[in-house]
Image: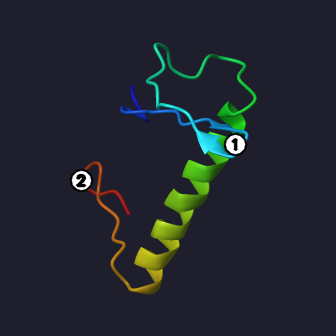
Amino acid sequence: MLLVTIVEFKVNLNGDLIRPFVPSRGIRQGCPLSPYLFILCSEGLSALLKKAEFENNLHGCKVIRGAP
């Protein structure tokens, strides 16, 4: 599963941006950024769900007949 598909890094070196580069690998397991990216995405999804609920645009669906 790809969450971030296109990434380009730009590094600020002594006030000047060096030429952008594309990483050859994604975020590795155990990377200190992973929990923050998860929280960021979770918060965004939560905000979208709360907005949809507030605007009465959130509806459930029945999985099987006779389900509540």
The amino acid beneath tag 1 is: Tyr
Image x and y of residue 50, in percent: 52, 74
Q: Looking at the image, which residue sits at the far bottom? A: 55
The correct choice, above or below, for 5 with respect to 38 in the image is above
Which residue bears the numbered disc 2? 65
Q: Name the image quarter holding the C terminus.
A: bottom left
Q: Residues within 10 Å of mark 1 (few under 14, many from 20)?
A: few
Q: Is residue 64 left or right of residue 68?
A: left
Q: Is residue 61 left or right of residue 25?
A: left
Q: Residue at x 55, y 33 (%)?
A: 18
Q: Residue at x 69, y 46 (%)?
A: 15
Check the picture and name the quadrant holding the N terminus.
Answer: top left
- Residue at point 33%, 78% (across, down): 57
2 vs 67: above or below: above
Under mark 2, the amino acid is Arg
- In this rendering, the answer to whether 65 lies above or below 25 is below
- Label 1 SS: helix
Q: Which residue is the site of mark 1?
A: 36
Q: Quadrant of residue 47?
A: bottom right
Q: x, y percentage for residue 2? A: 39, 28
Judging depth in this view, the residue of 15 and 48 nearest the camera is 15
| In the image, residue 34 above or below residue 45 | above
**Which mark lies nearer to you, 1 or 2?**
1
Image x and y of residue 34, in percent:
66, 32
Q: Earlier in the sequence, mark 1 or mark 2?
A: 1
Binning the other alpha carbons within 10 Å of mark 2 as few (below 14), some (14 to 19) or many (20 upward) gives few
**Measured from the top left, where is residue 22 in percent x and y?**
43, 24
Viewer-closest of 28 and 59: 28
Which residue lies at the image location 55% right of the left edge and 62% below the top edge? 46
Left or right, 13 with reference to 52: right
